[in-house]
Image: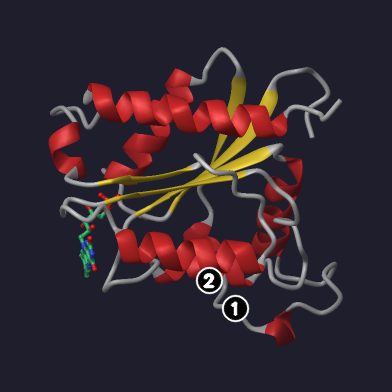
Amino acid sequence: MTESNTKHILAISGSLRRKSSNASVLQAASQLGAERFHFTFYNGLDTLPHFNPELDGDGDEAPEPVRGWRAQLRAADGVIICTPEYANGVPGSLKNALDWIVSSGEFLDKPTAVISASPNPLGGDKAHASLLLTLKMLTASIAEGATLKIPMVSKKLNAEGEVTDEATLGALKQVLHVLERQMQPSS
Ligand code: FNR
């Protein structure tokens, strides 16, 4: 956790593409929240080995990329995941990363926002639902209002890949607001 009042958010894109629209959405969120949050972008999805509990040992013996992934989660006050849908489900690399957390528990009560973005009109609804099931199993804390589906995402970006659609930017602000409230210490 960060020591100052600035909350630290770990942003995770479920896409490995260089020009990913999901990464663009996370970039927009980081710009909208720049004054209140410190964003770190996790970029190790494709460095994690395929999940195998036999590689995990007692946790200290887990492969180095897995230890790094877990450490980044532990250091975050909150998490935002933005993912595409592949073949009606969560991209395998993202699911693989989450499988590594089942036994180590870094998502326990972690304030988490879940966003899916797709060029199709359903906004990746099946990946979204499946991701929620997985994160709830990991006991992530997902508040009402901390979820968002972004349909037709390609129409909401400009030629530089920046989110320019006002409604989408407004919805992202609202998600950040809910996440921020959740990260406040309860009095
Ligand atoms: C897709 N895409 C897709 N979209 C969707 O809404 N439902 C789906 O089941 C799939 N399946 C799928 C399979 C494969 C093999 C590809 C290549 C693509 C489209 C996908 O949402 C689109 O490529 C997004 O733009 C990917 O997100 P990024 O990389 O732009 O963040």
Residues packed near mark 2 inside 10 Å, few (<14), some (14 to 19) or many (20 plus):
some
Give the quarter of the image for residue 51: bottom right
The image position of residue 179, as x and y in percent, is 59, 34
Give the quarter of the image for residue 67: bottom right
Q: What amino acid type should be assigned to the residue bearing mark 1?
A: Phe
> Residue at 75% across / 56% down in the picture?
108
The image position of residue 27, as x and y in percent, is 40, 31
Q: Is residue 132 above or below residue 41?
A: below
Q: Are marks 2 and 1 in contact (CB under 8 Å)?
A: yes
- Name the residue furthest top: 35
> Residue at 56% across / 68% down in the picture?
134
Q: Identify residue for label 1.
A: 51
Determine the quadrant in which ligand 1 lies.
Answer: bottom left
* Residue 163 visible in the current orientation: no
Q: Is residue 29 above or below residue 73?
A: above
Q: Is mark 1 within 8 Å of ligand 1?
A: no
Describe residue 30's horizontal placement relative to residue 105 as left or right: left
Describe residue 60's horizontal placement relative to residue 144 as left or right: right
Q: Is mark 2 within 8 Å of ligand 1?
A: no
Mark 1 lies on a secondary structure that is loop
The image position of residue 61, as x and y in percent, is 82, 72
Q: Mark number for residue 20?
A: none
Describe residue 177's horizontal placement relative to residue 27 as left or right: right
Q: Nearer the viewer, residue 173 or 157?
A: 173
Q: Identify residue for label 2.
A: 96
